[in-house]
Amino acid sequence: MAITIRTRPVRSHLQYVVVAATMLAALAAVLPIAAAIVTGRGGGAVARTAFATAPSGNYAVVSRPERDFDVIAVVPSGGGEPVEVARVSHLPGFTSTGAVSADGRRLAVITADAGSLTRPRASLLVVELETGSVRSLAADVDPLQTPVWSPGGRSVVAARVIEDGDAQPTVRFLTVPVDGSGASTLYDVRGALGAWAVGFEPDGGLIGVTINGTGSHLTRDGAYLFRFSGEITRDWRLSPDGGQLAYIETNLDSGLRYVGGTVSLKGGAARAVEALSEPGARHLGVAWRPGADAATFGRLPAEASGSSEVGRVERLTSAGFDVPLDYSKDGAALAVERWSGTSFANPGESSLEIVTESGRFEVGAQSRFLGWTAR
């Protein structure tokens, strides 16, 4: 998850620590793209992507960045060629972030498509996966964020940075309806190094994270809850039931280490770290398997338990390691960022892979994972 830092000197430093040191996010992949098709619908010719008539099953939504646009595609979890859905323009050298709606029909995209390379400005777009249509919902949003869908899929939460002359700009959170009726303000965060929307609880509360000089803090609908870490954190993920938040902490107690943890959102700030049963364990990447009580953290093979299988579908080989990204809604498939090296300090080459109980396959050496959909 991208980190946005609000003061210029601190921003550069923290981006280096939090972004550059977190495994160099995958960029472009060269994969064949299946052609889109056109079919009749409702008495007239309506453009539809090949995904509209694809077989039933789980599909990973991915992007393949080119110089000034991203190819959005879907890939069957059992293996196969990506099926192109749409193309999203961006500034040269940038790439988009995205999130799939709960019903799997739409993809919300943040793309840096205006401004300059040093001061980019981004737009919030929505991509219809079955028709391939791309619509702009809001302009001038923060390029360093991942959009968050409302539970019903009728709106998207995105952040806008308001430069008002203060040393630390205001982060304004917006709710943006997909019907194009215009954005409205949810709340503002002032005086922080950075603030991010994480996800919605089942009852509709929006969980966010704010980072300042004292550490990482939780908010609900903009209201302060508590500090859950004295360090900078990242990779925040809500559990499916909304009762826990898993995260990665950039711990500096004994040199730079990435440590996974979970915090309860019910009944106070008691931390639960059952996943960290071995002292000194290092983690990167968080995913929640549907129905699981604990999060899945990526860890080095040497620090994994004696079994080569962690959970139901995560299989770590003797060489390299996986950074978990997200499970399909039925838990049958897991998207991972696969690294060929032996440590976070020496990660080797990366590739996006899909893991199931029947095996694993590579999507692309530099493709980016955006979410899951199903037919």
Image (cartoon, rainbow, N blue to C red):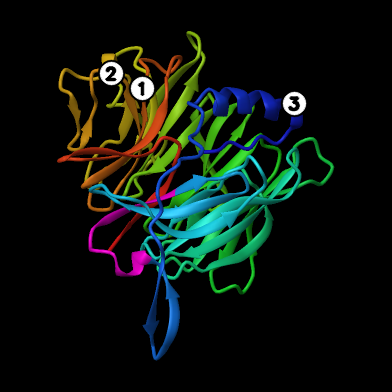
Tell me if mark 2 has few (under 14), some (14-19) or many (20+) residues whose alpha carbon lies within 10 angstroms of its own: few
Q: Which residue is identified by label 3?
A: 9
115 and 2: which is toward the camera? 115
Could one spot residue 270 in this view of the protein? no
Three-letter amino acid code at the position of disc 3? Pro
In the displayed structure image, the side of residue 96 where residue 313 appears, left or right: left
| Residue 51 sits inside the magenta stretch | yes
State the image coordinates of residue 91 (x, y, percent, origin top left).
67, 47
Q: Position of residue 224 (x, y in %)?
A: 55, 43
Taking 352 as reference, is 56 left or right?
A: left
The amino acid sitting under disc 1 is Ser
In the rendered structure, the answer to whether residue 288 lies left or right of residue 347 reads left
Q: Secondary structure at mark 2?
A: loop
Disc 2 target residue: 319
Question: Nearer the N terminus, badge 1 or badge 2?
Answer: 2
Compute the Cα span from label 1 to label 3. 34 Å
Residue 104: x, y in percent? 36, 62
Whether pointer 3 and pointer 2 mark residues with C-beta atoms closer than 8 Å, the reply is no
